[in-house]
Amino acid sequence: MDRLNITLGDYQDDEEDDFLSLEDDDNNNNKDNGNVSTAKLELLQSLRDKGWGSGVMSSLSDIAYSYKDDKSSPWYEERQVIATLYRARVLLHELIETKMNQERFLSGNLCVSEIQSLLNTQKEDVETDWIAEIQELKRNMVAEIRRNHLLERDLLKLDKRIALLIKHRSNIKEMILEQSKKSKKKKDGNGDAIALDAKQLESYQNLFYLLQTEPHYLAKLVTMVQADLMEDFLDTVFLSLFGDAFSPREEFLILSLFRLAISQEMSAIKSAGDLISVESVVPKMIITYTRRKQGHEYLKQIIAPILENGVVNVPDLNLELNAVQVYQNMISEEEIKTGTKSTSNRGLGEDQILQLKAVQNILEPRIQKCKDICERFFNSIVQSLNRLPYGIRWICKQIQNIAIKNFDSKPDEIAKVIGYFVYYRFINLAIVTPETHNILNKEVSNTSIKNLVCIAKVLHNLFTMKTFQNQGSEKWLQPLNSWILSKANTVRQYFEDLVHVSDPSEYLRVDKYNELTLKLNPVVVISLGEISQTHKLLLTNLNSLKAKEKEDPLELILKSLPPPFDVVDENDREIQLTLTNRFKEHIEREISTSASLFTETKELVIQVFRAIPVQEKSSVQTDDIYQILKSAIEFGNKNQNAQLSQNAEKVLANLKKLESEGTVHGSQDFIKAIALEVINRQDIREHQRKERMRLTIALRDLRKHQAYLNDQIHHYTSYLKDVLLHYGPKDKKKSTKPIKISYKDLVKKGIIVESDIPKISQSATSFFISSDTPGVFDIEARIGPATAGTISLTLDDLLDKSASGGTVLKLENIVLDVNMTLHLLDRHFLKNIK
């Protein structure tokens, strides 16, 4: 920049041409971009070093002035003021310009030449093409999922047939003993007992699986539940649906629910502090969550020993710090001990009482004892951070992240909220009421309860970073303020360390793909009352819960169920639900469609931009991606770079398809997407690395699961054969003679429904039924002495048909009634089964 002359007339109107586009003081840069990742800041610095954004103005330290530092020269002070104002103007302009450029950079509003400059500052990827590899892994997963679905279907079919055969065998024995009706009455003798039929039970199993694995339903529903139903509903969700004991799968799913619930709750408040001051659902959810087994175990291990040995079992421990109460007690004890009225003045004021040496002698050791006990609790809590349930720590991390993002909350404000949830809503309850929360197995005396309340108040103020004020009952605890303040930095560090936990998928080693490889379906034990209440709540709020634009899975399941049943205490009972996924194909569709053409196209464009010369700098609005790609094809052909030409041609074809689908809206929209991809390259690459690892593990587990399914099918097939053997006669030496039944008798008994046998031949037609193999029946049709045809029926096929609601069995020339045919076979062949 030209040097300044002494007079104002020497200022040039076009000094703005020299303003810096990206240059900025490091401190201002960090301050203005507190939420920008370190990688991005380093990238910005690298660009500055390379002169990105030319026409940079020299730093203020380089601005020199031509006039001499002579106070005797004319207008010296005025010149100094003008020079200072100019420097301030330049600095302000630089700051504004820098801020605007950084915002433009982070929002992706860059031209192609700027994107290429960014790419030149980044190392070219030498790793395998992860996008292509991820897509190939997903294609393989889809293929394996389909194979596993077929195997699971076959396995379920075998399992169903085995169950039907065993049940049918039992029914036959009941029929032979003529006690089937009596037995049924004995079994169902409860009168008004609620019974779920097979289809109803299956629908409820589908429903609760959906609620477990799709947390957005419960995250919405929990905000719609009436206050008087909230406690019971939260018990249903956290203790029944997700289980009381720790399981990585259930923990992953319950934390997914918390993620949505916290985000939803905090989007409706104005500050992080409102989360604990308004009538929020999240605190109630956290209280119920901490009652699960891992929370209770933590309290038993960390809090219970100090409660027992430091407070409850300590004789004569008294932490009463109210000086007036201490003075009155002192007088009463003196009178009881001496048998004479005390001469002490009971009407002394608080300040006068505090001056009494006798009162001070009582208070001082009590204050010290209170500090000592609080110190023990505090040290135990802080030192056991790694034993604090992971879920509580992760929930606090979510609250902190959203508080910073939504409200720009200060660390101490966030610490108070975390302290409220970790201490007040979790640990404090065990200290104040240990017997209620089953922390101690003994009754706590009134004196001990008062002592515990005092300790809890001190720890509460400590973990919520407050001191006691000179008002009400707090004034007597003010001597403990110095101890609280001395621990403030330790508390801050504790809260800072508390939220340093990895994501659930990493910590629990569970992700969405794990559902595809479950060897055993999840099981929940839930009461009929809980089922009915949940069903009613879902029906009442269905319009708010379901997806508006498509057929919603929740709505489909609810439509398949009859109206909710009413449950009273007398007929309420717990049942076991084996949860099943009715919508497995949705996972397959999600994986197959996520192999995005858009993602692949962005990767190809980046390769093209690296290979072609840097474009002339232009505005974002004037860049034409199509023209640049056509130039890239020409450049590739001219320089014998076939790969470049092929990539550019493929991008052009993909772009036309993406525009027709509505994924891309014009050249500028696509260039912005590329810019954001490049700016966030490091984060995206890390995400891809994790996704690649997850998919590799998931694919390996799918193949292991496939081997498991094949093995199970082999065992079930063998077991089916063993079950069928029980349908053979007790006496193996005694062969079963074929039975002969005329066509007319079969029609009369309702066994034959339709047939193609001509009427003229029907009177001469007979059927001979035999069974040489258990569970297999050979039927030979004869017209006179001539054999007209032979068919085979299997018992498990007939039972499966009947259980599925099928009423007829269509054969080549005849249609049989399924149930009547089973009755015939039972009477003639299955009387003497083993």
Image: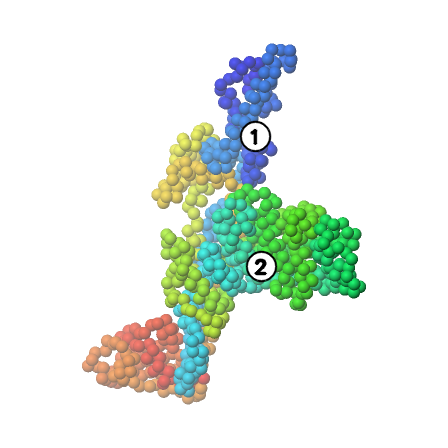
- Residue at the far right: name it: 338
Q: Where is 561 relative to 143, above or below?
A: below
**Side (left or right) of 118 relative to 651:** right
Categorize mark 2 by other alpha carbons within 10 Å: few (<14), some (14-19), many (20+). Answer: many
Residue 314: x and y, percent? 74, 63
The span from disc 2 to disc 1 (Cα, nearest Å) is 49 Å
Residue 446: give x, y in percent of width and height: 67, 64
Residue beneath the point at 69% across and 62% down:
448
Q: Residue at coordinates 51% horizontally, 53% vertically from top-left?
A: 279
Relative side of 564 to 123, left or right: left
Front residue of 590/573: it is 573
Instruction: Give SS at disc 1.
Output: loop
Quadrant location of the N terminus? top right
Q: Marks 2 and 1: which is nearer the front?
A: 2
In the structure shown, which secondary structural element does the residue marked by tag 2 occupy? helix
Location of mark 2 (residue):
290
Q: Position of residue 821 (x, y in %)?
A: 33, 79
Q: Residue at x 37, y 43 (%)?
A: 662
Tell which of 253 and 329 is nearer to you.
329
Residue at left offset 64%, top offset 63%? 434
Q: What numbered label is drawn on residue 611? A: none
Residue 795's image quarter?
Answer: bottom left
Which residue in the structure is indicated by mark 1? 24
Task: Determine the image quadrant of residue 563.
Answer: bottom left
Mark 1 residue type: Asp
Q: Quadrant of residue 631?
A: top left
Specify whether 699 is left or right of 807: right
Residue sitting at the far left:
760
Residue 322 appears in view: yes
Vertical order, 224 against 71 (above or below):
below
Q: Of marks 2 and 1, which one's residue comes earlier in the chain?
A: 1
